């Protein structure tokens, strides 16, 4: 295969948006200006050197494409370099601290990867006869068994493929349970601090969303829940610890009130990383909770891999779990119940099927590897270290930035509001953009909505003290620069990123999704 230079410029690149005008290429050493694939390749060449087939008859019944497909032709090195160059402009947990609150961007251990690549796990196919994949089934069941042990729940649906997908699964089980009781409940209570997927899930399933305001200390007031409970309420969707990084200390009272009103308690388990090995949602009165394996259990996310959102269910909801599900037999062995018909012979009433096959096999291998390599004590320590790291950030930055809820201990993440920027002319967005120039991915911004100009920081247990100290020093220095009136620097930031300050609103409102010349 020969490397051709089709599409590479031969005159100085004075217009590359991120380019220093002083180099011929527009590159800055290893920061390489990368054109689009359509600019690198050409429509009339191909990187494939197989001869065109002899005339043959297709079996498409006249439905074959007649117009050009308009995909650029590229050699293998061109395609390879394109994606490697782009990947170097990206941020990743393997590059540095990734403080994205509520997302739990923790280290993805390499042991997980080694296990997931074992051929017996990596090469199985979902349509293989079950008798040929018994080990793989045992692994899925074992992963589920650990989740049940850690959550104190009765049953687990392993198949949902993300947190939001798990929410839909859990809420569909609730809907089926209510229908089975012959009741008509169409309201779901959602606190103001909830992640947007909570009300979206409820709405998608046809429920009406009624919001519950946060009280001054950032938590949900059981009295506010009680005034909204009634025979029309199907469920509450509550996150604990919540997205302010606070433990909902009235959770048991809320659960009891919800149950007394005949409703169900859906817990958003995205923040489970703060309490693994410390508290079991089943003991707190939870009926359904998704677990983001890609957050708490260290499987890759944020462009690194597919999610997995198993849902644990209480006794009351277990019969409604979707097929396929894992059935534990008296002798401790496990089998997949594949169809609704078989499930019904076992007395179950599955609400249906939420995904074509059994879920994200590769993620189950990684998550179980993480659990087994930590053990119960190690998982508990990971939670404790995550909480310690967040409280260290809170304590060190409390005097220069404004902690939203200073009186309460933080759980795995700490929430700041923008009052420390008041009068400086610098906004939360400007502050976050300046972090990019310092080599950090910004924290979660403007979420949760219950505080003004939110900055939500989750350091996770992966960071050393030295790493936390450098991060804290960076934020401290930026806060002092803002207070010192260095507004120009903030408004221009990021200046060292390949694309500087982009108009994100315009990009979202008028996205250009096709290449036009
Ligand atoms: C991440 C997150 C979700 C959604 O999970 P996905 O896996 O991204 O679908 C829901 N709620 C909270 C609080 C989250 O942080």
Image: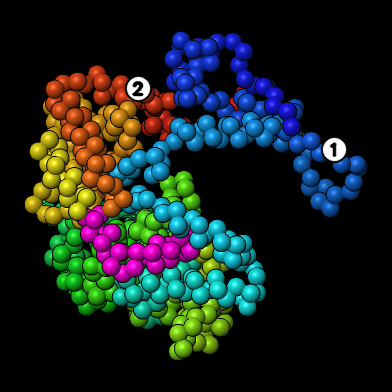
Residue named by callout 1: 51
**Over which residues does the magenta segment extend?**
363-387
Considering the image in quadrants, where does the C terminus appear?
A: top right
Alpha-carbon neighbours of circle 2 within 10 Å: few (<14), some, or many (≥20)?
some
Q: CA distance from mark 2 to mark 1?
A: 48 Å
Residue named by callout 2: 495
Kindly identify the residue that appears in the image at 81 percent across and 51 percent down: 60
Residue 218 falls left or right of residue 68: left
Kindly identify the residue that appears in the image at 26 percent across and 62 percent down: 381
Q: Earlier in the sequence, mark 2 or mark 1?
A: 1
Prevailing secondary structure class for the magenta stretch in the rendered image? helix
In reply to whether residue 366 is colored magenta, the answer given is: yes
Q: Secondary structure at mark 2?
A: loop
Q: Is residue 115 visible?
A: yes
Kindly identify the residue that appears in the image at 12 percent across and 35 percent down: 400
Location of residue 74 by image quarter: top right
Location of residue 447 by image quarter: top left
Residue 298 falls left or right of residue 248: right
How far across and how far down the image is residue 409, in percent?
A: 13, 55
Residue 227 falls left or right of residue 144: left
């Amino acid at each position: 295969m020969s490397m051709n230079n089709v599409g590479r410029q031969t005159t100085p690149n004075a217009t590359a948006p991120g380019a220093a005008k002083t180099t011929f290429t527009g590159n800055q050493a290893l920061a390489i200006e990368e054109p689009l694939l359509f600019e690198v390749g050409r429509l009339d060449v191909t990187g494939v050197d197989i001869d065109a087939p002899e005339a043959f008859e297709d079996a498409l019944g006249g439905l074959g494409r007649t117009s050009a497909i308009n995909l650029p032709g590229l050699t293998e090195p061109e395609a390879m370099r394109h994606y490697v160059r782009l990947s170097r402009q990206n941020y990743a947990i393997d590059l540095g601290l990734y403080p994205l609150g509520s997302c739990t961007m923790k280290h993805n251990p390499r042991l997980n990867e080694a296990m997931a690549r074992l051929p017996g796990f990596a090469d199985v196919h979902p349509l293989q006869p079950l008798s040929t994949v018994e080990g793989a089934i045992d692994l899925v069941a074992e992963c589920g068994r650990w989740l049940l042990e850690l959550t104190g729940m009765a049953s687990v649906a392993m198949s949902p493929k993300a947190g939001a997908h798990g929410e839909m699964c859990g809420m569909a089980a609730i809907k089926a349970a209510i229908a089975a009781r012959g009741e008509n409940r169409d309201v779901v209570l959602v606190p103001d601090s909830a992640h947007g997927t909570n009300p979206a899930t409820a709405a998608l399933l046809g429920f009406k969303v009624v919001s519950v305001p946060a009280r001054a200390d950032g938590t949900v007031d059981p009295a506010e829940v009680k005034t909204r409970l009634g025979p029309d309420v199907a469920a509450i969707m509550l996150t604990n610890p919540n997205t302010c990084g606070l433990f909902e200390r009235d959770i048991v009272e809320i659960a009891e009130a919800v149950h007394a009103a005949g409703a169900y308690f859906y817990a958003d388990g995205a923040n489970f990383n703060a309490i693994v090995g410390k508290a079991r949602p089943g003991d707190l009165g939870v009926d359904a909770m998704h677990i983001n394996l890609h957050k708490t259990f260290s499987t890759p996310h944020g462009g690194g891999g597919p999610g997995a959102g198993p849902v644990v269910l209480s006794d009351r909801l277990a019969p409604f779990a979707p097929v396929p599900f894992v059935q534990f037999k008296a002798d401790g062995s496990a089998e997949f119940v594949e169809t609704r018909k078989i499930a019904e012979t076992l007395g179950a009433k599955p609400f249906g099927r939420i995904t074509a096959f059994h879920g994200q096999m590769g993620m189950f291998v990684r998550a179980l590897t993480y659990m087994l390599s930590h053990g119960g004590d190690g998982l508990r320590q990971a939670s404790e270290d995550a909480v310690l790291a967040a409280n260290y950030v809170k304590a060190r930055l409390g005097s220069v930035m404004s902690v939203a809820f200073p009186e309460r201990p933080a759980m795995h993440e700490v929430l700041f509001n923008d009052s420390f920027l008041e009068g400086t002319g610098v906004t939360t967005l400007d502050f976050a953009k300046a972090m990019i120039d310092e080599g950090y991915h910004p924290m979660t911004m403007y979420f949760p909505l219950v505080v003004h100009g939110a900055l939500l920081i989750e350091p996770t247990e992966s960071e050393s003290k030295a790493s936390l100290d450098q991060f804290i020093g960076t934020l401290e220095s930026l806060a002092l620069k803002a207070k010192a009136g260095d507004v120009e620097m903030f408004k221009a930031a990021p200046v060292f990123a390949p694309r500087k300050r982009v108009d994100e609103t315009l990009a979202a409102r008028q996205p250009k999704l096709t290449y036009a010349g």
